[in-house]
Image: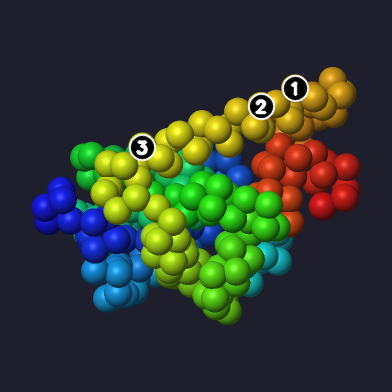
Amino acid sequence: MSEQTPWHLQPIAALDTETTGLSADQGDRIVEIGVVQFDQGEKVDTWGSLIDPECPLPKDTTRITGIRPEDIVGQPTFSQVADEFLRRIEGRLLVAYNASFDRAFVLEELGRASKSLPGGAIWLDPFILAKEIQRGQGNMKLVTVAKRLGIDLDAAHRATADAECAGKVLFALAADLPGELAELVDLQERWEAKQHAERAVWRARRPHGAAQQVMQYFDGHGPKNSLGPRYPHSDETDPVRHMFLRGTGRC
C-alpha cells in the first residue's frame, strides 16, 4: 500500500494478550492471545487462542479473565502458535491498547520460540492517544474510553474482544488525529513522552517511603505481581499510583 494512503485505510492487526502477571521479563507468560484484522477500517478476520503458559495459572488471572486452569489443559504453547500469530500480523500496522505491555510479552514469547516480529513493525496505541484526546474526561480503562466513543465491550479481559475494541477505539479517534501515518507516529511519540514526564513528576512528589514501596513492585523486589488490572483497565490511570494503591490495599 502507498505511503500516502491514510493510516486508517491501511491493513491493521489489532492484538491483545491475557497473561499470568505484569512482568514479561520476570517470567510471567501469555495465557491467551487474539488478533483482529481490519482492512480499510472494516473488520475482516478474527483469530485467537488460549495458550498453555507452561506454569501454574494464578488465581488473579482466573478472577479477572475467567480463564480457569482446566481451560488451558491441552492448549498449545505460544511456540506452537507463533507462526500463525506472525502470519496474522504480517504486513499490517500493529494496534494494542497500552501497547508497551503487550509488545513486551509478545517479544519475550517470540524470543523463547527463536522468532521475531516482522522488520519495521509499527505500533499504534489508542491508550496514549485517548489520554490526550479525552484528557479530563475520566479514567482511561479500555471499556470506559470505548463507552465514551459509543463502542460496546461485552467481554472485557478476553483477548479477541479487547483487540477488536482497541481497533475500533483507534478508528473512532481518527477524526482528531493526523491522517498521514508518519505524522501520527510522531504525534504519538510526543504524547507518550509527555505522559512519561507527567508520571515522573508524580513519582518525584511522593514521600520517600511510598516511592520506595512503589518501585519495589516494578523492580520485582516487593510482593509478587499477580495479574491484577493492567493500569489502563483499572480505575487509576497512573500506573505508579495504581501499584501504590494495590500495595496499601486500597485498589
Q: Which one is nearer the viewer's eye here, 57 or 235?
A: 235
Check the image and name the residue furthest to the left.
Answer: 2
Q: Secondary structure at mark 2?
A: helix
Q: Residue at x 59, y 63 (%)?
A: 145
The disc at residue 23 is none
The disc at residue 204 is 1
Mark 3 and mark 2: span between their CA atoms? 21 Å
Q: Residue at x 82, y 52 (%)?
A: 251
Amino acid carrying label 2: it is: Ala
Compared with 119, 59 (above or below) is: below
Q: Give how far across and how far down residue 152 sits, in percent.
A: 55, 78
Q: How is the image coloured?
A: rainbow
Amino acid carrying label 3: it is: Asp
Say whether marks 2 and 1 touch (CB < 8 Å): yes
Q: Nearer the viewer, mark 3 or mark 2?
A: 3
Mark 2: few/some/many CA within 10 Å (<14, 14-19, 20+):
few
Query: Which residue position is annotated with label 2?
Result: 200
Query: Which residue position is annotated with label 3?
Result: 186
Q: Give how far across and how far down residue 25 sits, in percent.
A: 52, 35
Q: Give how far across and how far down residue 130 sits, in percent.
A: 53, 54
Compared with 86, 164 (above or below) is: below
Q: Which quadrant is the N terminus positioned in?
A: bottom left
Q: Which one is nearer the viewer's eye here, 57 or 219?
A: 219
Q: Which one is nearer the viewer's eye here, 54 or 208?
A: 208
